[in-house]
Image (cartoon, rainbow, N blue to C red):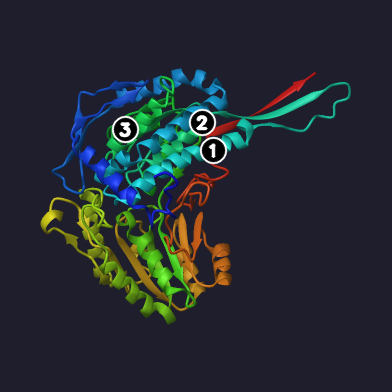
Amino acid sequence: MAGFKLTYATMFNPPEELHTQFDAALAKVKANLGKEHAMIIANKDVYADEKFEDRSPINTDWVLAVMQKGNEKHAAEALAAARKAFPAWSRTPWQKRVELLRKAASLIEERLFEIGASMALEVGKNRMESLGDVQETADLIYYACSQMEANDGFIKPMGKDPLVGYDATNISVLRPYGVWLVVSPFNFPFALTGGPAGAALVAGNTVVIKPATDTPWIVRLLAECFRDAGLPEGVCNFVTGPGRTLGQALVESPEVDGVTFTGSYDVGMKMFRDFANGKYVRPIILELGGKNPCIVSRHADLERAAVGIIRSSFGLQGQKCSASSRVYIEEPVYDELVARLKDMAEKLTIGDPTERANWMGPVINKNAYQDFQAFVKEALEGGGKLLTGGKVLTEGALAKGYFCQPTFIVDLPLNHRLWKYEMFLPITTIAKVKNLDEAMREANDVNYGLTAGFYGTEEEAQWFFDNIEAGVTYANRPQGATTGAWPGFQPFGGWKGSGSSGKNAGGYYYLQLYMHEQIRTLIR
């Protein structure tokens, strides 16, 4: 792939070589399924007495890996290893930390296809989404390194005190907090683990990683990249197990100096409250999902709008915190755009996402599969109508997986709870509005504020940017109405109930969240 850089922008027209390499890597990965994988504590493989099988949502007969069911003891061991490693790692020159983290990012790129194939099998992403997740992880780490360099390690001279007879030197230094916990979600298990972990590590913190129970195997592959890059013993630790035991023990431990969590609003708010029970206030970075609107003006390019809405509604089966789950269309173009959306949705290919022909794969697990059916039923009982989809797929090769049709629901009353509830599934509600002001009122009337999209004139787009309450906003974007952030281009983070920091990952202000400031005054 010399000369080709994979990004969300370029993946829509990849070279043939990409597919050839993916197919070869997939065959290699499939030939080695079912192996046992350890946790990693202080750079050593650690096994638990209890195990659990990690099965594919594509076909639940496929055992991808046997993972460790870690417990409170393993949480304590990982935190102790991270605490022991912190003094030396925090005092390691930032240039050396940058060097090691860049090596980890380079290893991720070298292993792109094997990791991408594993991602498709475990998460159910199509091959392009899987490869994009992996490459984005490398780019997030590279970006954190570049920000450390661009700011000279965040050591900044301040003004001199006007003291007669003395010479005063004031220096601002950003220094790491200590032991940082990263709790990551199933949908972007690489980027939303590697991005926060990379930032925490290059800043000088040591890290304990706890992946989602549905995606431990892929995160183990990330932890291997950190270890193989030469990070010292205890600097990056990886533990697996249930959130209610292992995860809770990590969050409640006084040994944790900071947390990054990506996941649902309910779980994140509980974590926020539990973490606040410590001896003092500690930083917690939360990304808690979205209920992302797309507004379509009567002046919009409807072909562009339709493509963007489809991609953002049903990419990764709607299991993105940035998915376009609400669409508000001005009345004069409503019928035409709805007809386009119906036609495009019904042409989407659904099946094993490792196969090149399939754009949609399964939802992540049985609970999501059952939730899909329950939400569709609730919407229909509440007055909504199916424009397309609404069914689970149980025929033939799909019978042993969790496959759901891409679903658009129309005519659902705007006061129905599903307009404000994050379903995290391939279900998008569509409404007709009289004007853009009505659309904006509805768009902002939620607890969330992650992403938002707009289609219309440039003048209208500026109005949209000025009025929408969201951290990541897009106008007239065919690549995705509300999805497709990339480090250095569209930093990712939310307002209101979608995020706690007010700063976006992959942007200018994110790395500093992993450090606190010390002012050094020396009088001569």
For the residues bearing labels 3 and 1, Cβ distance under 8 angstroms: no
Location of residue 310 in the rendering, given as x and y in whole percent from the top left corner:
35, 64
Q: Indicate left or right for 7 with 187 as reference.
A: right
Closer mark to the observer between disc 3 and disc 1:
3
Please name the amino acid that badge 3 sits on. Answer: Arg
Q: What element carries label 2?
A: helix
**Mark 2 to mark 1 CA distance (whole Å):** 9 Å
Front residue (pair 340, 208):
340
Please name the amino acid that badge 1 sits on. Answer: Leu
**Mark 3 to mark 2 CA distance (whole Å):** 20 Å
Question: Which residue is farthest left?
Answer: 396
Location of residue 387 in the rendering, given as x and y in whole percent from the top left corner:
28, 72
Q: In which quarter of the image is residue 219?
A: top left
Q: How crowded is mark 1: few (under 14 residues within 10 Å), some or many (20 or more)?
A: many
Residue 1 seen: yes
Label of residue 202 in the image: 2
Task: Note whether 179 is above or below 6 in the view shown.
Answer: above
Residue occupying the point 43% across, 48% down: 4
For the residues bearing labels 2 and 1, Cβ distance under 8 angstroms: yes
Q: Pick whichever of labels 3 and 2 is earlier in the sequence.
A: 2
Front residue (pair 122, 263):
122
Closer mark to the observer between disc 2 and disc 1:
2
Label of residue 220 in the image: 3
Which part of the image, by quadrant, shows the C terminus?
top right
Query: Which residue is labeled 1 in the image?
Result: 511
**Mark 3 to mark 1 CA distance (whole Å):** 24 Å
Location of residue 454 in the rendering, given as x and y in whole percent from the top left corner:
48, 66
Q: Is mark 3 on a helix, strand or loop?
A: helix
